Image (cartoon, rainbow, N blue to C red):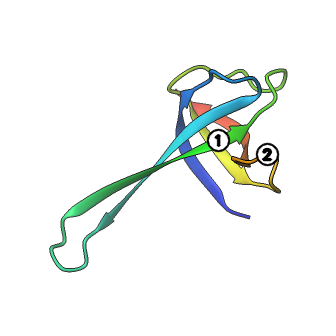
């Protein structure tokens, strides 16, 4: 299963956190660092994990939980 780290950017919907995962890689020809980011809708249980904006979390791929949610929050890493 795929595990990623990212930052919580939205907690507006119930039991769903939007996590932004950013990756950095070097361009093959120009060797300039390129940043790319992607947003994932992640399921989390508010009773087990207390999240606030800008928390760094680890997310894990799961079965499809809804139309957009294929990940769940595994643990909170820090601010």
In the displayed structure, would residue 40 be above or below residue 63? above
Q: Position of residue 6 (x, y in %)?
A: 53, 43
Could you tell me which residue is drawn at 18 percent across and 65 percent down?
A: 32
Q: Where is residue 8 in the image (x, y as percent from the top left)?
A: 55, 32
Dot 2, crowdedness within 10 Å: few (<14), some or many (≥20)? Answer: few
Occupied quadrant, residue 3: bottom right
Could you tell me which residue is drawn at 77 percent across and 28 percent down?
A: 15
Give the side of residue 23 with respect to residue 10, left or right: left
Occupied quadrant, residue 23: bottom left
Between 73 and 13, the residue placed more toward the observer is 13
Q: Position of residue 37 (x, y in %)?
A: 42, 50
Could you tell me which residue is drawn at 27 percent across and 68 percent down?
A: 26
Image depth: mark 2 or mark 1 in front: 2
Which residue in the structure is indicated by mark 1?
41
Q: Which secondary structure lies at badge 2? A: loop
Q: Which secondary structure lies at badge 1? A: strand
Residue, far bottom: 29
Occupied quadrant, residue 66: top right
Circles 2 and 1: CB atoms closer than 8 Å: yes
Dot 1, crowdedness within 10 Å: few (<14), some or many (≥20)? Answer: many
Q: Position of residue 46 (x, y in %)?
A: 79, 22
Which residue in the structure is indicated by mark 2?
66
Quarter of the image with the N terminus is bottom right
Which label belongs to residue 10? none
Could you tell me which residue is drawn at 27 percent across and 60 percent down?
A: 34
Between 65 and 47, the residue placed more toward the observer is 65
In the displayed structure, would residue 29 be above or below residue 66? below
């Amino acid at each position: 299963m795929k595990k990623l780290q990212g930052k919580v950017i939205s907690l507006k919907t119930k039991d769903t956190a939007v996590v932004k995962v950013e990756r950095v890689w070097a361009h093959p020809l120009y060797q300039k660092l390129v940043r790319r980011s992607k947003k994932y809708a992640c399921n989390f249980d508010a009773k087990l994990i207390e999240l606030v904006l800008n928390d760094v979390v680890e997310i894990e791929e799961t079965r499809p939980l809804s139309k957009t949610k294929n990940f769940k929050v595994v643990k909170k890493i820090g601010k």
